[in-house]
Amino acid sequence: MLDLHFARTPNGMKLKLFMEELEDLGVAPPHRWHLVRLSAGEQHTPAFLAISPNNKIPAIVDHAPHGGDAPLSIFESGAILHYLAEKTGHLLSRDTHAKWDALQWLTWQVAGLGPMAGQSGWFRTHASQEDLYAMERYTRETQRLYGVLDRRLEGRAFIAGEYSIADIACWPWVVSHAGHGIALDDFPNVKRWFEAIRQRPATQRAFADYRDPYAVVRHPAEEIA
């Protein structure tokens, strides 16, 4: 049994998207969803900090880890996606080159695209006072990263060959492109990839009730994670 702790933010939705894809494949392991109410401060409770010491979502507890009797808790979305892909044998190629191709782009997302886009969204839509320098800096870097992804997707349907956790990690952040100051028309390969994934049944189910915290219209800032 997996306990899956999440909230409806870009990082949290990676977990939703992954599990919905497994549902379509008919291989989803037994699991329970736990919605962490960020605005209520549930990410700071001792129980949650025991599994996610950085008080961020998502986090999981695997009560039946491979090769161990004790439950295994994991935090950080990149580590979680890697673990679940290895555990289930899906959405991460077993071919050495393809596997590490996907994992390096997964790392690129968690180290670059997510943090920079998140800062861009924050300063553009949530900051209590306007900071033009910060807005320009983070928007410019986010645009550069979209350019990196656009070049990667030239001639490719997905980031690392077959649809994988690399795509699952990146896509929820691209959902929020407008709030990051990004026009997808400027990145045609990203736009094509984005629309293809948006049409997947698993994506439509996962994002049916999604609330974009980086939308152009301001939303409660405390919901961002």
Image (cartoon, rainbow, N blue to C red):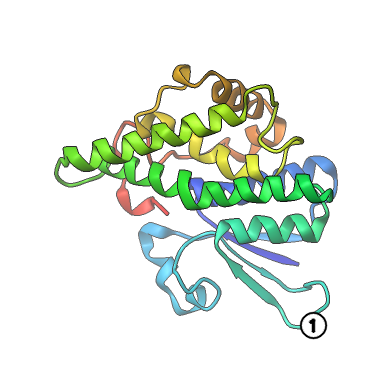
- Badge count: 1
Query: Which residue is label 1 attached to?
Result: 69
Residue 60, quarter of picture: bottom right
Occupied quadrant, residue 168? top right
Is 202 or 179 nearer to us in this picture? 179
- The residue located at (43%, 31%) in the rendering is 177
User: Residue 48, image x and y in percent?
Assistant: 50, 73
Q: Quadrant of residue 55?
A: bottom left
Tell me if 216 is positioned left or right of 50 in this view: left
Camera-nearest residue between 149 and 79: 149
Left or right, 160 with reference to 153: right
At a point 34% along the width and 29% down the height, the residue shown is 181
- Left of 205 or right of it: where is 215? left
The residue under the point 50% across, 34% down is: 174
Q: How dense is the environment of label 1, judged by Cα within 10 Å: few (below 14), some, or many (20 and up)?
A: few
Whether residue 133 is visible: yes
Q: Where does residue 151 sit, x and y in percent of width and height? A: 56, 27
Disc 1 secondary structure class: loop
The N terminus lies in which quarter of the figure?
bottom right
> Between residues 111 and 222, which one lies in front from this camera angle?
111
Give amino acid for label 1.
Asp
The residue shown at (39%, 37%) is: 142
Q: Is residue 118 above or below residue 34?
A: above
